Image: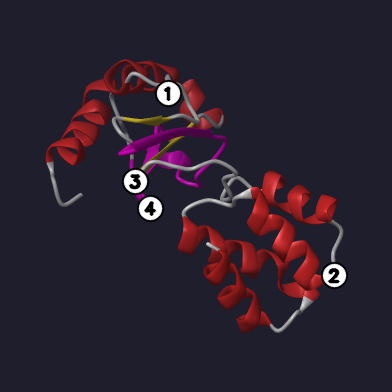
Amino acid sequence: MEQTVKKVLARHGGDRGALIPVLQELQRELGWLPEEALVAVAQSLGLPKSRVFGVATFYSQFSLSPRGRHLIQLCQGTACHVQRGNRILEALRRELGLKPGEPARGGRFSLEVVRCVGCCSLAPVMVVDGVAYGRLTPERAVEIVRDLDGDPDA
């Protein structure tokens, strides 16, 4: 991890304005943002730790805990909520045996509830590994997850 952090920071040459791009690269490289990485970023960019942690916790794209190999983001914004997105959440919880924010099935899946994915006309929506699935039913959501779970390459 230490080498990855050094490499990412070196690419940005200590530019304080590069905080978000640095965090994005670290998230992409490490899969999450460990506390040690955030402290190193703060020191390298000459920023208070509170500022770095504040940015990392404000944006939902960042995770301060390890995520599963497949990230399921279930929208619970207004349009998805009105279209009974809570039924999809319950079906996924049952299927995966987890609560939002916990990795499941040996680290294969993480489930996150998000407030909006910008696909309101397709409500209810979930995003799995960056791919949006709209007009979902609980059955279809579970089917999508089962397809990933049964694919050894996924």
> What residue sits right under mark 1 in the picture?
85
> What residue sits right under mark 3 in the picture?
69
Name which residue lies at 42% across and 19% down. 84
State the scheme by which the image is colored.
secondary structure
Distance between mark 3 and mark 1 Cα atoms: 23 Å
Distance between mark 2 and mark 3 Cα atoms: 33 Å
Q: Nearer the viewer, mark 1 or mark 2?
A: 2
Residue extending farthest front: 2
| Disc 2 + disc 3, Cβ < 8 Å | no
Vertical side of 37 occupied by 63: above or below: above
Dot 2 crowding, Cα within 10 Å, few <14, some 14–19, many 20+: few
Which comes sooner in the sequence, label 1 or label 4? 1
Mark number displayed over residue 46: 2
Name which residue lies at 67% across and 64% down. 20
Vertical side of 33 occupied by 46: above or below: below
Distance between mark 1 and mark 4 Cα atoms: 18 Å
Which residue is at the front of the view, 140 or 96? 96
Dot 3 crowding, Cα within 10 Å, few <14, some 14–19, many 20+: some
Name which residue lies at 77% across and 48% down. 54
Residue 49, quarter of picture: bottom right
> What residue sits right under mark 4 in the picture?
130
Which comes sooner in the sequence, label 2 or label 4? 2
Circle 4: residue type: Gly
Dot 1 crowding, Cα within 10 Å, few <14, some 14–19, many 20+: many
| Disc 3 + disc 1, Cβ < 8 Å | no
Q: Position of residue 28 (x, y in %)?
A: 48, 61
Q: Nearer the viewer, mark 2 or mark 4?
A: 2
Magenta region:
107-133
